[in-house]
Image: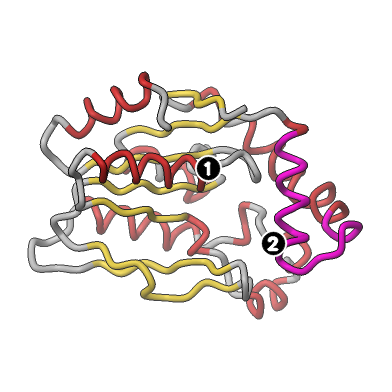
Amino acid sequence: MIPAPFSDRLAALLARGQRTILGIAGPPGSGKSTFAAALLAHAQAQGLTQSVILPMDGYHLANAELARLGRATRKGAEDTFDSAGYVHLLARLRQQHADEVIYAPQFLREIEEAIAGSIAIPADTRLIITEGNYLLLDRGHWSRVPPLLDEVWYVDVDPAVRLQRLIARHVQFGRSPAEAEAWVMNSDEINAALIETTRSRADQIVRRD
C-alpha cells in the first residue's frame, strides 16, 4: 500500500507525459527495494505496464576486482561500485533512441555477484524506479546522479528495525548470526552513517516504520 501523498506525487510526475526516472535512496536495510516494488505494483495496477525497477546494486564491482583492490571486506561502501558506469546508464536512459533496448546489470544476493544484461528497458518504458544507497551522495561520480533523475525520495526507518532486517538478511544468505552482526556493525553501519548525511537532499522523505 502506497500512502496517498506519494501515490499522488507519482501520478503528478507521470502526468507530464514523458519518461519518469524516480530515485529511491536510503541506508542499508531501510526498505528501499520493498518500497520500490510497491511503487511498481501500484503503477502497474493503474495501467502503467511500461515500468521497471533498476537497482543501483547491479553496479557492484565483481568480487575478484574487490579482492584485487583490497576492498572485499568493505563491499557496499561507495568505492565498491562502478559509479561512473551507473551514471553512464542513467544518461543513456535520458537519451534513449526509439528503436533501442538498453540492458542493465542485476545483483544476485545468492551468488553475491552482478549479472550483465539482466534488465531490459525498451524505449517505451514510461517509469523507471532506480533504488540504491548513494543516489544523493554529493561527491565523485555520485554527484552526477541527481540531475539525471526527476526526483529522489529517501526511505527512513527506525534504526533498530533496520539493524534487525540487515542481520536477518545476512543470515538468510549464509552468514552465521555472529558473522552477520559483525558485518552489519563493521560495514553496513559505517555506510549507513554516510548515507544518512544525504537525507536533506531528498525531494521527499518516506517513513517506513
Give the spatial CA distance, label 1 vs label 2.
18 Å
Q: Residue at x 47, y 40 (%)?
A: 35
Q: Residues within 10 Å of mark 1 (few under 14, many from 20)?
A: many
Does 14 lie within the magenta span? Answer: no
Q: Residue at x 18, y 43 (%)?
A: 47
Q: Which mark is residue 125?
A: none
Give residue 125's quadrant in the image. Answer: bottom left
Label 2's element?
Answer: loop
Farthest right residue in view: 178
Label 1's element?
Answer: helix
Q: Which residue is mark 2?
A: 75
Instruction: Indicate the amino acid at tag 1.
Output: Lys
Colour convention of the picture: secondary structure
Q: Residue at x 62, y 57 (%)?
A: 79
- Quadrant where the C terminus sits is top right
Upstream in the sequence, badge 1 or badge 2?
1
- Quadrant where the N terminus sits is top left
The percent position of residue 173, horizontal first and vertical second, equals: 71, 66
Cβ–Cβ below 8 Å for labels 1 and 2?
no
Residue 25, relative to residue 89: is it above or below? Answer: above
Question: In the image, which residues are magenta?
Answer: 161-180
Does 167 lie within the magenta span? Answer: yes
Instruction: Indicate the amino acid at tag 2.
Output: Lys
Question: Is residue 126 found left or right of 38 in the rendered image?
Answer: left
Residue 187 vs residue 108, the one in the foreground: 108
Residue 24, relative to residue 79: is it above or below? Answer: above
Q: Residue at x 29, y 35 (%)?
A: 150
Q: Which residue is mark 1?
A: 32
Question: Is residue 102 found left or right of 17 in the rendered image?
Answer: right
